[in-house]
Image (tube, coloured by chain):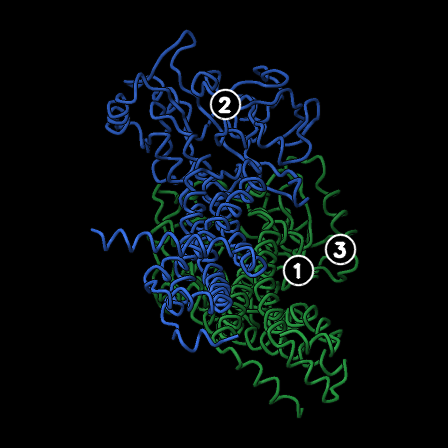
Amino acid sequence: MKYLPLVWRNLLRRKTRTTFTVLSIVVAFLLFGILAALNMAFSMGVELAGNDRLVITHKVSIIQLLPESYAARLATTPGVVDVLHQTYFGGIYQRPSNFFMQCPVQPEQLLTLYPEYVLPEDQKKAWLTDRTCAIVGRHTADRFGFKVGDRVPIQGTIWRKKDGSSSWEFNICGIYDGDKKGVDTTPLFFNYEYFDEARQFGQGQVGWYVIRIDDPAAAPQIAERIDAQFANSFAETKTTTEKAFVQAFAKQVGDIGAIIRGIVTAVFFTILLVAANTMAQSVRERTSELAVLKTLGYSDGLVLALVLLESCAIAVLGGAIGLGLAWLLIQGGDPTRGMLPAFFLPTADLVRGALFALALGIVAGIMPAVQAMRLRIVDALRRT
Amino acid sequence: MRVLLGWLSQVVVVTLLNLRTLGQRVTSSLVAVVGIAGVVAVFVAVLSMAEGFRKTMATTGSPDTAIVMRSGADSEMVSILGIDDVRLIGDAAGVRRNEKGPVASGELFVIVDLLKKSTATAANVPLRGVGPNAFAVRPNVRIVEGRRFETGRNEVIVGRGAAGQFSGLEIGRTLKFGQGEWTVVGIFDAGGTMSDSELWCDAAVLQPAYRRGNSFQTVYAKLESPEAFTRFKDALTTDPRLNLKVLRETDYFAEQSQMVSTLITTLGAGIALLMGIGAIFGALNTMYSAVAARTREIATLRALGFGGGPVVVSVMVESLLLALVGGAIGGGLAYAGFNGFQTSTINWQTFSQVAFAFAVTPGLIAAGIVYALVMGLLGGLLPAVRAARLPIVSALREL
């Protein structure tokens, strides 16, 4: 501890240089934080996906519909506890860019299958009893200012009503929250019965099923059992865990994770080089000083530690400011104004960032530190 | 005039002297170069992705081709047309005709789940059922391997991009979708357009397989000329029997690409901007240390009577030169590493995959180098001013 003032004085020796080095590290970690949040937004749900839930889609593709009658057969399949079906509605609210998902569902099953959706008691009651009721997630409600009691007009792109019109209206009678951070609260849900009666075609056809199973470990066997049951029918099925389903969906965009890792690597490599060079330079300039320290009896190890401490101080300072700035910026909301389902900096990435900062300090400082340690007093003092 | 000439010759002398000593500061100069190269490489690479995507979409349409969907549909995926609609559209004014009748193709557009090679996860691959005149509507489509599918048979041909991105699409392989098995019989090249991402088969075979009865989703019609579009559109939109949306193919695809390319461009530019700020700090450090290393030299020049201006210019030239080298290396790296790199992403508007190649265009490289020069300019300015303001006497005394 008593050496801290010495490290501090050394840092202040060239104030501009230290400042710029710290600033470039700040930028690196600011980018790291923002990219981590983006990565999180794209891979959303993978971590939160229930491991006791399976998703059943048409084998050919998700746009093919499945018969509603599968529900009864699924319910009696051994291992299956609850069954819910969903259908993609694909409506437009005012402008196509205002995209959010709408989905007709069975009200009660939705709440059993997704306990992470939390509704106030009175709204829950309305949702379960009133067929014209629709509930919307907090994220979308905030984005468009929907309030309980609003009537929201939505233009159907796929589904038309029996009279041929494509304008649907939904009564918002509930706004649900997620019970933890990261739960997707963008979809609007409405009553399937109301939908099935009103739609022009496709009666008795649903988009996909979500089921809960009693034993997550038995998921592969149950999935196999379900797919075998519907094999060779017109609508063959493909059953996967919710996690695999969400993951595959995210990867449709491309390997976002790989792209982001690539960019972060490039950024860190660049910054590391700049920081390491600065460190090396400041040690070179101080050769004679270090020799004096050694003459005074500072051990080799201590000199090594002092130089390393200096570079770590720069890296950790820059890292802390950068991550802090990223965190602040991310609090301000997502840059696409609501297109991303969630935008926050996961704690795990904060910790990872802090470790990276420390590692950066060590890697940048190790070469000059070892040089300083190996310095022979006589040579160093002779050099000017 | 003589004053100006004198000043200019001073600039040249100081700058040359400066550059000749660059070798002594090679490490720190290299650091600035590598820093800027890294930023430019990322900048160009990310933007080349957006550019490649935009290019694929932009080359897809042809101005003398029209796409017809049901009104209210915002993409092919959600449109439905009856067989009568398809006939009426084919017979409308302005449509080109050949021996098979109108050069128009009633088409189905669905997706099939195939494994994406790069991630080994299922992806939505577009499958298009086309009419007999589809090849006449899209003259750029040609078979490069195998043959065309035969009318009435369960056969598919695969676009080059799709064949590269998704597994199981080699000639002779069978796919299972709808009812029955389909054989891959050919690979086609559509000149880098959207069609390269697609699988094609006979619409008449796809209809029963997907229980679509007699319905189609869109009609692509080749017009007599690009100018015939207005006539064609008016004929269809004024027909009381029809309720259609008529678009020029070029406009349709430009609109389809907007969301994805805006997203990539915005994110890419944001990342590059931030990285650039980081690199400016790096350049600042390099140039400050360059000035510091030359303190005595600069002071000597000043004592000899050289003005402050030439010193400023010389430092700026050094900084800009380093930036230029960095920018060129970065642009080169991006070109070598990414130009033509094949990838695919989902186009949310059609809910299906689009295969495209990164396009590192000369324009992008130029933009990267300009960006590098801006970094060099900002990184060199403050150190240059410091160099000019050095107090001569004390600077000469410095070790």
Mark 2 vs mark 1: in front: 2
SS at circle 3: helix
Give, as a three-letter code, the residue at label 3.
Ala
Q: Residue furthest front?
A: B304
Label 2, label 1: how far apart the Cα atoms are: 42 Å
Q: Does residue B298 lie above or below B75 as drawn? A: below
The residue lying toward the viewer, choosing from A146 and A325, is A325
Q: Which amino acid does label 2 sit on?
A: Val
Quarter of the image where one finds residue B375: bottom left
Say if residue B179 shows up in the picture.
yes
Q: Is residue A361 above or below residue A290?
A: above
Image colour assigned to chain B = blue
Residue B138, placed above or below residue A240: above
Q: Is residue A100 visible?
A: no
User: The C terminus of chain A appears in which quarter of the rendering?
Assistant: bottom right
Judged left or right of residue A10, residue B251 is left
Query: Which secondary structure lies at badge 2?
Result: strand
Task: Please tell me which residue is depicted at 64% across the width and 56% down the height of the picture.
Answer: A83
- Crowdedness near tag 3: few (<14), some (14–19) or many (≥20) residues, C-alpha within 10 Å: many
Q: Which residue lies furthest to the top in this view?
A: B99
